[in-house]
Amino acid sequence: MNKAQLVEAIADKMGGRQQAADAVDAVLDAIVRAVVGGDRVSVTGFGSFEKVDRPARYARNPQTGERVRVKKTSVPRFRAGQGFKDLVSGSKKLPKHDIAVKKAPKGSLTGPPATIAKAAGKKAAAKKTTGAAKKAAAGKKTTAAAKKTTAKKTTAKKTTAAAKKTTAAGAAKKTTAKKAPAKKATAKKAPAKKSTARKTTAKKTTSRSK
């Protein structure tokens, strides 16, 4: 029996072929997604689906007999339930007018299976954690950039202030250096007055002698 035949087999019970096809697709999709996420899907009386990890190993090529290295991998596994095994082995008779697999207890079908709900919860939590981590990283980058900008501005201000102080000190030194020769010139002119005074005294002495 393939998928199309399975849909035809349950079409009357589901109210039509399209409804049956949608139901089969939904069930298979839910099982596959749960198993891929690492959850175990168990159906009472039917069996369980789970993910199994196989370690790296050596195998033998059946055609050449050559030893081949097989990498580590994960495979899906189905384990039949006891009720399914009993029906197949013939220890129990297959009911003609009832469902072969035992019905789930009342209230267990009010929402998605527990394994699927757990998988959805894990995915949502992972998304929230990733979003929070991205926001925190963005905030840290912004803060670091702001600190760098502030540090650059502070350094520029300090450099400008130091340059102003250096310029002011240089100008003061130049001014002092220019004023110094004026004092020396004044000091040199002073003896000239003394020589003039001497000449005046000599003239007065000459006039008196006459």
Image (spheres, rainbow, N blue to C red):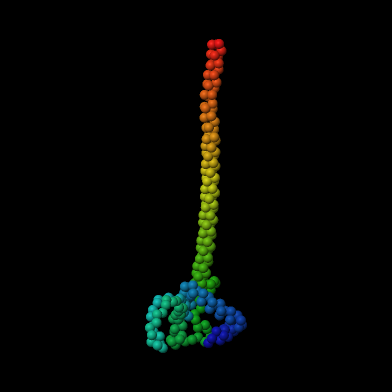
Residue 48 is at least partly visible in this image: no
- At horizontal 40% and vertical 80% (from top left) the residue drawn is 69
- At horizontal 53% and vertical 65% (from top left) the residue drawn is 127
> Residue 105 appears at what percent x and percent y?
50, 75
Using the image as rendered, state which of residue 37 and residue 94 is in the foreground: 37
Using the image as rendered, state which of residue 144 and residue 62 is in the foreground: 144
Using the image as rendered, state which of residue 9 and residue 76 is in the foreground: 76
> Residue 80 appears at what percent x and percent y?
45, 81
> Residue 152 appears at what percent x and percent y?
53, 50
Outermost residue on the bottom side: it is 63
**Is 144 placed above or below 193 here?**
below
Is the C terminus in the top left, top right, bottom left or bottom right quadrant?
top right
Residue 98 is at least partly visible in this image: yes
Determine the image quadrant of residue 17: bottom right
**Is 164 placed above or below 201 here?**
below
Image position of 113 (left or right of 59): right
**Is 176 placed above or below 54 here?**
above
> Residue 126 appears at what percent x and percent y?
50, 66
- At horizontal 52% and vertical 27% (from top left) the residue drawn is 188
- At horizontal 52% and vertical 52% (from top left) the residue drawn is 148
Using the image as rendered, state which of residue 200 and residue 110 is in the foreground: 200
Q: How many marks?
A: 0
